[in-house]
């Protein structure tokens, strides 16, 4: 685990160099963020990878210059859309939760 100083430096570097944060104004510092974090740092590897893929596609990485996307009511529909080659599928959190699926 890294020290607080390393975490602050890493966050400041990410804010300065990552194009995702370009132009973002904050009323708080990296030190404030690190100070308010809990001692246990969960990592959401699958969500982070998926978010990065979508971010890259939306910001110029799409083969056709745009990203085809549909909304799905259930996870089963989303799986079928993905199998059909759709690049992005929107799933509403409350809808999927209400569906009670296990997909």
Image (tube, grey):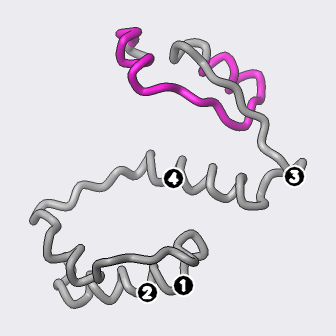
Q: Which mark is residue 65?
A: 3
Q: Earlier in the sequence, mark 2 or mark 4?
A: 2
Side of 22 relative to 67 (left or right): left
Q: Earlier in the sequence, mark 3 or mark 4?
A: 4
For disc 2, the neighbor class at 10 Å (few under 14, some 14 to 19, many from 20) is few
Q: Which mark is residue 49?
A: 4
The stretch drawn in magenta includes residue 94: yes
| Alpha carbon distance from label 3 to label 2 | 30 Å
Q: Quadrant of the C terminus?
A: top left
Q: Work out whether 2 lies above or below 63.
A: below
Position of residue 39 measured from the top left corner of the image (x, y, whole percent): 9, 65
Q: Work out whether 103 lies above or below 13.
A: above
Instruction: Determine the secondary structure under disc 4.
Output: helix
The stretch drawn in magenta includes residue 5: no
Instruction: Determine the secondary structure under disc 2.
Output: helix
The residue depicted at 56 percent of the width and 77 percent of the height is 23
Instruction: Determine the secondary structure under disc 1.
Output: helix
The residue depicted at 32 percent of the width and 89 percent of the height is 9
Residue picked out by circle 2? 13
Q: Earlier in the sequence, mark 1 or mark 3?
A: 1
Q: Work out whether 23 lies above or below 94.
A: below
Q: Are marks 1 and 2 in contact (CB under 8 Å)?
A: yes
| Alpha carbon distance from label 4 to label 1 | 19 Å
| Alpha carbon distance from label 3 to label 4 | 21 Å
Q: From the image, state whether disc 4 or disc 1 is nearer to you.
A: 1
Position of residue 3 measured from the top left corner of the image (x, y, whole percent): 17, 85
Residue picked out by circle 1? 17
Highlighted magenta segment, given as a residue range: 78-101
Side of 8 relative to 75 (left or right): left
Q: Work out whether 83 lies above or below 74.
A: below
Farthest residue to the right: give it.
64
| Alpha carbon distance from label 1 to label 3 | 24 Å
């Amino acid at each position: 685990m890294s020290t607080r100083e390393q975490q602050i430096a890493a966050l400041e570097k990410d804010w300065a160099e990552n194009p995702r944060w370009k132009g973002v104004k904050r009323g708080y510092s990296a030190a404030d963020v690190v100070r308010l974090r809990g001692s246990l740092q969960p990592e959401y590897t699958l969500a982070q990878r998926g978010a990065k893929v979508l971010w890259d596609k939306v910001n110029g990485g799409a083969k056709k210059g745009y990203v085809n996307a549909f909304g799905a009511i259930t996870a089963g529909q989303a799986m079928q859309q993905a199998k059909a080659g759709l690049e992005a599928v929107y799933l509403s959190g409350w809808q999927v939760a209400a569906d009670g699926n296990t997909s």
